[in-house]
Amino acid sequence: MKKFRIIFGLVRGFKKRLISNFVFNILNAIFSLFTFAALVPFLQILFRTEDATKSVKGGVINRMWQDFSVSIGHFVDTYGQVNALVLMCSAIVLLALLKNLVNYLSLLSIAHIRSAVSSDLRSRLYARILELPLAFFTNERKGDLISRMTNDLMEVEFSGIGTLEALLKSPVMVLISLVTLFGLSWKLTLFSLVFLPLSGFLISRIAKSLKNAAKRGKGTLGNLISLIEETLTGNRIIKVFNAEQSFTEKFEKQNKAYFRLMTRLYRREYLSSPMSEFISLVVISILLFAGGRIVLAGELDGKLLIFYLVVFSQIIQPARAFSDAIFKINKGVASLERVNEILHAEVTVKDKPDARPLAAFNDAIEFRNVTFGYDPTRPVLKNLNLYVPAGKVTALVGQSGAGKTTLSAMLYRFYDPQAGTIEVDDVPINRIRRD
């Protein structure tokens, strides 16, 4: 349930569109129920395969069915079979038109949500990249960050938000179909529901392994893109030191690791649809046998059993769509977790509540007992003291890596010292606004 809360948390600001999508899905389910399924037994009456006035056993739906059968029989007797056939075909066309219209409107509402959430995440990521201190980028690989802002964000849109349609639509269609099935034969429906927990358990087991594989795959892809970025940036150095073979071997190692991970991921993902279809066909076969025995016992009309099986078959597609959505949403959540690692990364360099603008620089810049290291366990500067008077030129001389650039980076507040203070005119720079 946690992964559903994560995805729905992204769309909580679109309540009106979600409600309209829910209404359209209800209408779509109702029209789907009658477009073809309800007309199959009607055609049996139309062609007079059985006596329409024959008494049937059962509850409300059976009695409604008998009344409707009688009405259709009278219509055929009065206007003829050809006119009745025209009426039936016209009804199918009208219902199909209405069904596809509401389906289009439901997809349209989800499309807006999908695009809006993706755009919002993209904007938040870019703003966060600009806000985070340089220390964050020192510890992260640029290629992996690019992968999170492109591949992972696309995965969230397609596999996360893109599955909302199935998550919202499938349960409605299944629920309305189940209500109809219970009205037709509660015994047969209860019998069919016995198999749902088993199929749900099998699908959930594969879905869990899919999420873990997807997250590892995204991490490996990030490493692969980082290596490509390093190769493009340092291509001249690679050639100077004849390091082509070394980098090729390194790339092939990463590439093969990604290949193995993605092969396992696709193996799990593609297993969901065949498994769902196989389980569905097994259940229908069992229902054919059980329903046939109920009909032979005289507890259900034979035409209603056909209607029952057609309605039950309508559950299969949304149920499969829902199970596929569970697989895809695991991939989307895995990518969203990688995106959130950037969005929720700590901003370590912050303004103090009483920070003020830098009005002027009149006296001096002073480093007092400053200690700093990019790795806190290996300081670059230890207890450094430096006095830089205003209006004078102060030169810093030292070998590469001694910390000259680091001093200016701390003065810009790209980094804060681990110990000591930096002051401008006796004001600590953490009490001066960063801008």
Image (cartoon, rainbow, N blue to C red):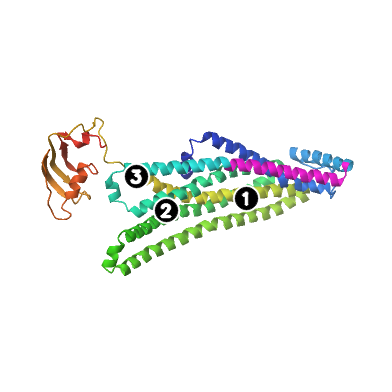
Mark 3 and mark 2: Cα distance apart in space: 22 Å
Considering the numbered disc 3 on the image, is that residue within a helix, a strand or a loop? helix
Percent across and percent down for residue 276 are 59, 54
Callout 1: few (<14), some (14-19), or many (20+) C-alpha neighbours within 10 Å?
some
* Residue 185 position by quadrant: top right
Residue found at x 37% / y 62%: 254
Residue found at x 23% / y 44%: 415
First reached walking from the N terminus: tag 3 or tag 1: 3
Callout 3: few (<14), some (14-19), or many (20+) C-alpha neighbours within 10 Å?
some
Residue at which label 2 appears: 215
* Residue 245 position by quadrant: bottom left
Residue found at x 70% / y 52%: 290
Considering the numbered disc 1 on the image, is that residue within a helix, a strand or a loop? helix
Residue at which label 3 appears: 129
Q: Bounds of the magenta span?
A: 79-107
Which mark is on residue 317?
1
